[in-house]
Image (cartoon, grey):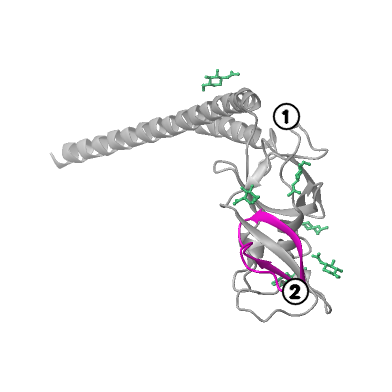
Amino acid sequence: MNSLFFLTLFLVFIFQTSVNCNDEIHYPFHIKGQQQKGCDTTLSGFELLFKDNITTIHFPSYGDLIVNSISYDTKKIDLLDPKNCTHRVFLNLNLTLTPFQYYYVLKNFTYLNCSTRVLQTSFIEVPCLSGSSYHVYTVDPEVPMPSSCEEVKTVAIPFKYNPYISDNSLGLRLTWNLHESQETKEENQTRDSHTARNTVVGMSICVFVMATVVRIKVHMSRRNFQKKEGQLLHSVADL
Ligand SMILES: *[C@@H]1O[C@H](CO)[C@@H](O)[C@H](O)[C@H]1NC(C)=O
Ligand SMILES: *[C@@H]1O[C@H](CO)[C@@H](O)[C@H](O)[C@H]1NC(C)=O
Ligand SMILES: *[C@@H]1O[C@H](CO)[C@@H](O)[C@H](O)[C@H]1NC(C)=O
Ligand SMILES: *[C@@H]1O[C@H](CO)[C@@H](O)[C@H](O)[C@H]1NC(C)=O
Ligand SMILES: *[C@@H]1O[C@H](CO)[C@@H](O)[C@H](O)[C@H]1NC(C)=O
Ligand SMILES: *[C@@H]1O[C@H](CO)[C@@H](O)[C@H](O)[C@H]1NC(C)=O
């Protein structure tokens, strides 16, 4: 009876912790149209869209990118290009007016658009940016430009195109920064409510365990007593 009561209490608290806020997406991110009590902080740049089981984030300079994973403690967000062309994202994505930066150290690379194929070892064609009559390369800005090429843009990106690296899984990792004032205030609020909840859950687990232990002890001592009684009766009978 006793432990059943505590178990119920315990489950109620567990349940409460998981319905309060979307477990997978939480602060500073939120899903468009899914703001709930306790998660109603809407920071610009952190809005995600959820459609057809796919979570995306919109960047005005590029468009929608698929959210593969978010790591809140290390502030990492891994994205995928729905069109499978990470170097098109690198070429166009401008993170200046967003809370995000690339997670990796950046280096300047020059995108070249060439009317003929360039047969130099440092020129590796980016297939998803090239067509039958033009060939796009990402090269070191120091490399002399062949006459058949024109510069598209020089941008600071994590790496140049490499056919051996599945850049879809490696490249589009961003990290984020909040404004100091926003961060302390809102993180404190979130932390405080989390701490309160964790305390309640921790305490109910503790009470539940203690109740169980007490029950087992009572049960055992009762059994011991019965055993001793039995022995006593035996010894009396033996006499
Ligand atoms: C979304 O996922 C659920 C369960 O994984 C599945 O039943 C549903 O058909 C999916 N919907 C779409 C639009 O893919
Ligand atoms: C994206 O690229 C991977 C590997 O290069 C390929 O297996 C996959 O089919 C591509 N997806 C799309 C939508 O083009
Ligand atoms: C990115 O956007 C900012 C602000 O709109 C602009 O000043 C900057 O030149 C852009 N950077 C690139 C590489 O286009
Ligand atoms: C890239 O080049 C620009 C212009 O020369 C420079 O301001 C910037 O610091 C460089 N970025 C990196 C990561 O080297
Ligand atoms: C390269 O040039 C071709 C035609 O000259 C153009 O259609 C294509 O969009 C260009 N690509 C890039 C990445 O600038
Ligand atoms: C947030 O918490 C830190 C210490 O954890 C404290 O110094 C700061 O004043 C708090 N900020 C607000 C706005 O409550």
Give the quadrant of residue 235. top left
| Depth order, front residue of 110/202 | 110
Q: Nearer the viewer, residue 216 or 108?
A: 108
Q: Which residue is mark 1?
A: 41
Residue 46: quadrant of the picture: top right
Which of the pair 101/229 is nearer the observer? Answer: 101
| On-image quarter of the C terminus | top left
Q: Are marks 2 and 1 in contact (CB under 8 Å)?
A: no
Q: Nearer the viewer, residue 140 or 145?
A: 145
| Residue lying at 65% horizontally and 69% vertically, measured from the top left | 144
Identify the residue at image location x=74%, y=55%: 66
Q: Residues within 10 Å of mark 1 (few under 14, many from 20)?
A: some
Q: How many marks?
A: 2
Q: CA distance from mark 2 to mark 1?
A: 53 Å
Residue 156 among magenta residues: yes
Q: Is mark 2 within 8 Å of ligand 5?
A: no
Report the span colored magenta: 136-159
Q: Which residue is mark 2?
A: 147
Q: Residue at x 73, y 32 (%)?
A: 43
Residue type, label 1? Thr
* Residue 80 appearing in the image: no
Q: Which mark is residue 223?
A: none
Q: Position of residue 14 (x, y in %)?
A: 60, 35
139 left or right, relative to 63: left
Question: Is residue 11 visible in the rendered structure shown here?
Answer: yes
Residue type at mark 2 is Ser
Residue 33 image point, x, y percent: 83, 38
Q: Earlier in the sequence, mark 2 or mark 1?
A: 1
Q: Secondary structure at mark 1?
A: loop
Nearer mark to the viewer, of 2 and 1 = 2
